[in-house]
Amino acid sequence: RLFWSVCRFRVVDMNRLRGILFLAGGLALGLIIGGVVLFTLPRGAGASKRPDPPTTGVQLANFTLEGLNRKQVSLNDMQGKPLVLNFWATWCPPCRQEMPLFEKYSRLLDGKVNFIGVNYDEDAVTVQDFVSANRISFPIWLDLGGKVSDLYYIDTYPNTYFVDEKGVLRAQHIGQLSEDLLLRYLTTLGVTP
């Protein structure tokens, strides 16, 4: 009896060991095949057409949005003058706090620099109420669904891009701007108030 118990135990152990080895072999084979497929695909095959994140010294990817005036506008339409492109939302306290600064300099530099506010995924009524209450006169574009924010890899607000007259990104600032910082960034665009 003892002999048969030991034999049965060894048979059960061997079956369990075969099962584990079979599973491990299958996983290893899957990893090898996955690696071969991954590294032999042409670069970018199967990837989305989302461009790389904006890089200083490189032209920004174009996009088209609707303004509060309900007209379609494109980033490329802004070429010819330096641009301050601010991504913001009404629910963002630092965004709300820096809006008067953008308003001040959009008026002061009228004709020299374009200031554009790109609102993140809020309805036109909410944005228009904020704009009216704060007497914002520079253009506000509506990024419904956050597609442009995704295109530009924006996940923190406010986020401001400083773009030269040819559409090339010269600087980016994440977070609230002070007046001194705004003036320094404007200098990188060749603009002095």
Image: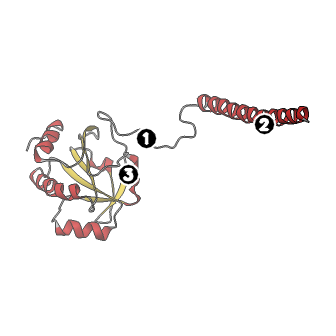
- Marks 1/2: CA–CA distance: 50 Å
Quadrant in the rendering for residue 36: top right
Q: Amino acid at mark 3?
A: Val
Measured along the vertical axis of the image, is residue 132 above or below residue 82? below
At a point 81% along the width and 32% down the height, the residue shown is 14
Task: Name the residue type under label 2.
Answer: Arg
Q: Which residue is mark 2?
A: 16
Query: Could you tell me residue 118's position as x and y percent?
Result: 29, 55
Residue in the foreground of this view, choosing between 51 and 97:
97
Q: Residue furthest front?
A: 2
Residue that badge 1 annotates: 51
Q: Is residue 2 left or right of residue 166?
A: right
Q: Amino acid at mark 1?
A: Pro
Which label's residue is closer to the chain start, 3 or 2? Answer: 2
Under tag 3, what secondary structure? helix
Please report the residue visible at 73 percent of the width from the left and 36 percent of the height from the top: 23
Q: Nearer the viewer, mark 3 or mark 2?
A: 2
Residue 125 horizontal/vertical position (percent): 30, 71
Quadrant where the C terminus is found in the figure: top left
Q: Nearer the viewer, mark 1 or mark 2?
A: 2
Front residue (pair 83, 10)? 10
Quarter of the image with the N terminus in it: top right
Q: Which residue is mark 3?
A: 148
Q: Is residue 130 left or right of residue 73?
A: left
Q: Residue at x 17, y 54 (%)?
A: 98
Asked whether disc 1 touches disc 3, contact meaning CB atoms under 8 Å apart, the reply is no
